[in-house]
Each structure stands twice: as structure tokens, then as C-alpha cells.
Amino acid sequence: MNHQESLYHFALQMGDNALILGQRLSEWCGHGPVLEQDIAITNIALDHVGQARSWLQYAAELEGKGRTEDDLAFLRPEFEYRNVLLVEQPNTDWAYTIVRSFLFDTFNYFHHVELTQSTDPGVAAIAEKSLKEITYHLRYSSEWMIRLGDGTELSHDKMQQALDDLWMFSGELTAMTSLETSLAAAGLAPDLSGIKPLYDGRIAAVIQEATLEVPSGAYMQTGGKEGRHTEYMGFILAEMQSLQRQMPGLKW
Amino acid sequence: MNLEQQFQARIDQEIKVEPRDWMPEEYRQMNIRQIAQHAHSEIVGMLPEGNWITRAPSLRRKVALLAKVQDEGGHGLYLYSAAETLGISREELIDQLHEGKAKYSSIFNYPALTWADIGAIGWLVDGAAIMNQVSLTRTSYGPYARAMVRICKEESFHQRQGYEILLTLCRGTQEQKAMAQDSLNRWWWPALMMFGPNDDQSTHTEKSMNWKLKRKKNDELRQQFVDVTVPQAEYLGITVPDPDLKWNEERGHYDFGEINWDEFWQVVKGNGPCNKKRMNDRIKAHEEGAWVREAAMAYAEKRQQRKLQQAS
């Protein structure tokens, strides 16, 4: 794989993470626990889909086959989707939603800080543009981790349960694939082993402040970044792609 | 002049009523009712459109729809705040909605079945709402009038966006155009019903007009809406589902057919296709969010306590 191709796959991976998490968060719209948070979570979903557009537009450009952001979002099969397993996990309730975002946002933040230094100007520019939003996402989900972890007994238990259940999907964030290894070697994307201690440290600190416990289970699921997904993914795509699949090739 | 006469005199001079001003109790209650109904409509209105966010056919449309529905939530938020200036809490207002004591716009009891409906809701539903809301920027209660100014700006953006969705469909394939026509067929009459009963049937009109809670009558607004909207449908190339619709040269307005008032009252009474679903969705969100709200309060109190302890 040459650099151009590697970057294309990387842009897809970044776009898919943002798109699938944005899709999940947007399911909350109109159903949030209180109006202010309904608006806030919808706004965050909007940020993610906006970032997905930047990455998928860039991917389409790198691929150079005349495909568009929408072709990539709506006409790829599941095994070509490169998002991590974490983001496709269901909303379940506000606790799972916050934990999922918190784990992802923490990684996403440190990752983007490094990506602004990419030797590829396209990657650096998207990272730069997204960083302000991502900084806010991390603040939002961290605050809710603490608020609910240290809220009532019920909220504490719900948060610990969500953390325990989602934990096995968190390791994939910092587990390097061969694509990421080769990108890191070329300075196009960061070496994730450098990000891992920062990520682990921040996660542990927030979990502690939230009076929660870091789950002990160490076995981690992987595969999303290589196109092997959980059972949830097929339903996400069936819903998201439905119109484009029913009536392909049209303008909307 | 007694208090009530002084109050009326100020209204007649177009002086806005502000939260701390004296006002007749009935004026206060009518305002609460109207503002709350409007706020509830924004919140319930998020549901039919929210239903299509996950299925929007392009990323650009998905972003625009998310932003739109988020705006509706924002409108709800500042309308609830405007109602709160009249001495009622948001919790009370929401309880009234969930208990079926407060109303919301009946239009949201109709289903959003296709992508074209997202266009039709923006074009017709927001379009009808704007007709009413523009007149309300001059309503006598200050906080409500000011909220309306801001809301109207965003609503007219939504309306253009909705129209543009339909325009794209009407310039597309036969199948897309048929989808647009079908959505107009289903939304036209409910949109006309949004202006409420005919003036001779409307119970609150006279008092509302004197107190300038309402600035234009139902039938006047409805006519204005028909006159503006029919040429827009012609431009799209789709047909308004009313065989009696005809330009009346003498009146300088369109004549249109009789509204099915039986359907209107049935939907108001709870027998529309989605009344139960909309209310169940709202109640479910509220109940499932209870532990989150309680935990947030508990945490805020703990933090306050810790601050006090540190200070002492």
C-alpha cells in the first residue's frame, strides 16, 4: 500500500468513527433525559457528523475515483466500515451513552492533538479544525461521568455497570493495526503507544473522581478497524443506508 | 381609571406588558396557556422529524435536519423560560402536558412517513407556524414577543430548507416527484387546520384580540397562508389536493374548499394517528430521565456542601 492508499484507509477509519458515533447519538434527539441535555447531545451528534463529512470528503479525494462522501457513507458494505467496535454499541440508556462517549472522546482528544502534527497537510488541517469541538466533547462526557458516578447510589451503580460492560471495547482504541503502524512510521499519524499512557492516565483520573472503579477485566475485543464488526452494525447501516439503497444514484 | 382600565390603556398604546407589571389574572392565565402550548408544540414537534434523522438520505441533509430539530428544542427552552416569567415552573408545565391537561399543535399527531414529509413539514408546517408567529412578534406580553422575533428568524430558514428538499425531489425522478406529491396530499389539509377553528367557532378570539395576545384572526391568517403557498406548489409542479381551490379575482384571494372539521376535532381530542405514540414517547423520555435528573441534583448539592465545608 502506498502512502496515498494508506491515508485513504485512515481517513475512512476516522470518518467512520465519527459517523457511526454521530448516528448513535442522534438517536437521542427528542428523547433526552432533560431538554438541555437533549439539545447538547444533538449538538454533539451534529459535530460528529460534520467531522465525518470532512474525513469522508478527504477520503474520496484521496481515492480519486470520483466517489463522493455520500457514496462512501451510504453505499459501502459493512466489512468496508473501519470504525472501532465501541462506537457502534447501542445507546441503552444515558449511562451507557455517557461512558461510550467518555472512552471515545478521551482517545479522540489525545489522538487529534497528535494528528495536528501530521506530515500530511490534509490530515493536520481536519484535526486542527475538529480539535475545539472534541475538547468540548471530552469536557462534557467527563463532567457527566463525575456527576452520575458521584450522584446517587442508583446513578453510581448504573455508571459502574455501563463501564464494566463497555470496557472490553475500549482497548481497540489504542491497539495499533498494521495500517496505523505504517502511517506512524511515515509521520502521517501518531504512534498509539505514545498516546496510550496519556489516555490511560486521564481515564483513571476521571473514573476515580467519579468514585467509580476501573474494570479489572483485561481481555479486549478488536476487529472494527479491520472491518469485523458486532451484530449491531448491520442494523445501523440498514437504517442509515435505506433510502440510498432503495433508490440508488439519485440526488437528494 | 381602575387597574384593569389602566392595563387596557397601556395595551392600546402598544406598551408591552412586562413580568413585574400588574396584569389581570385572566391575562396571565391566557398567556401561560398560549406560551406553554407553543413550547409543547416545539418539543413534541421534534419527534416526527427526529424520526428521520437516522435515515436522512445524504450527510448534508442529516446535518441540516439535526440542526433543525435542535433549533426546535432551543425554541422550546426559551418559550418555557418565557412562560416561567408568569409564575409557573417548567416542571408544572411538563406535568400538565403529560397528564393531557395542556395541548400542543395537533399537526404533530400526523405521521412523517417518507423523506418528502421532512420537506413538507418544513415548507407547510413551519410555513403555517410562521404566519402565526410573525403576527405574534407584536403580541402584548414582552418576553413572548421577544422570543418570537428570534424564533421567526430560525423558522423561516427551516421553511426554505423544507421547500428546497421538495424542490430537489420535484426536479428528480418520477418516483421522487410522486413522493413529493404524496406528502403534499397528506399535509395540506392538516396544515390549514393549524390556524384553528373558523373565527365564529373560536372561543378565545375576542378577548385575545382586545388584549393583543393575538394580533390576527384565524381565518385571516389561514387565507394569507393559502395565498402565499399555492403559487409555491405551482412552482414545484405538484397539485394542491383541493378541487375547489380557485383564484378569486374579485376578492384578490384564493377560494378554497371546506376543511374537515370533524377530523380536526377528533385529532384534538386524541384520536389522530399518532397522539398516543407522541405522548408515550414524551412520557417515556421523561420517566427514563428521572434518575439522571435526580443524580445531577444530588451531585450539585454535594458539591455545594463540599464548598461550604472548605470555606469554613
Image (cartoon, coloured by chain):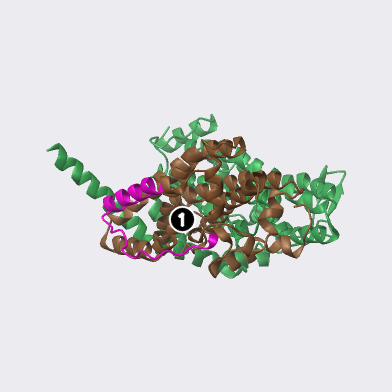
Looking at the image, residue B38 lies above or below residue A188: below
Judge whether residue A143 can be spotted in this image: no
Q: Residues within 10 Å of mark 1 (few under 14, many from 20)?
A: some
Is residue B303 left or right of A30 when viewed as pictured? left
Identify residue type, mark 1.
Answer: Ala
Chain letter for mark 1: A
Q: How many labels does the image show?
A: 1
Q: Chain A appears in which tint?
A: brown
x and y percentages locating residue B241 in the rendered image: 80, 60
Indicate the position of residue B162 as horizontal and vertical percent values: 70, 49
Depth check: give the residue in front, B222 or B56: B56
* Position of residue B105 measured from the top left corner of the image (x, y, whole percent): 58, 56
**Res. B170 in view:** yes
Drawing shade for chain B = green
Q: Residue at x 29, y 60 (%)?
A: A156
A221 versus A34 height, above or below: below
In the image, B160: left or right of A196? Answer: right
Q: Nearer the viewer, residue B191 or B63?
A: B63
Which of A175/A112 is in front?
A175
Q: Residue at the location (76% across, 44% down)?
A: B228
Query: Is residue A210 highlighted in magenta?
Result: yes
A223 part of magenta stretch = yes
Identify the image quadrant of residue B18.
top left
Q: Mark 1 points at which residue?
A: A175
**Residue at the extreme right:** B249
Residue at 56% in and 41% down? A186
Mark 1 secondary-structure assignment: loop
Residue stretch in magenta: A195-224
Say left or right for B178 vs B144.
right
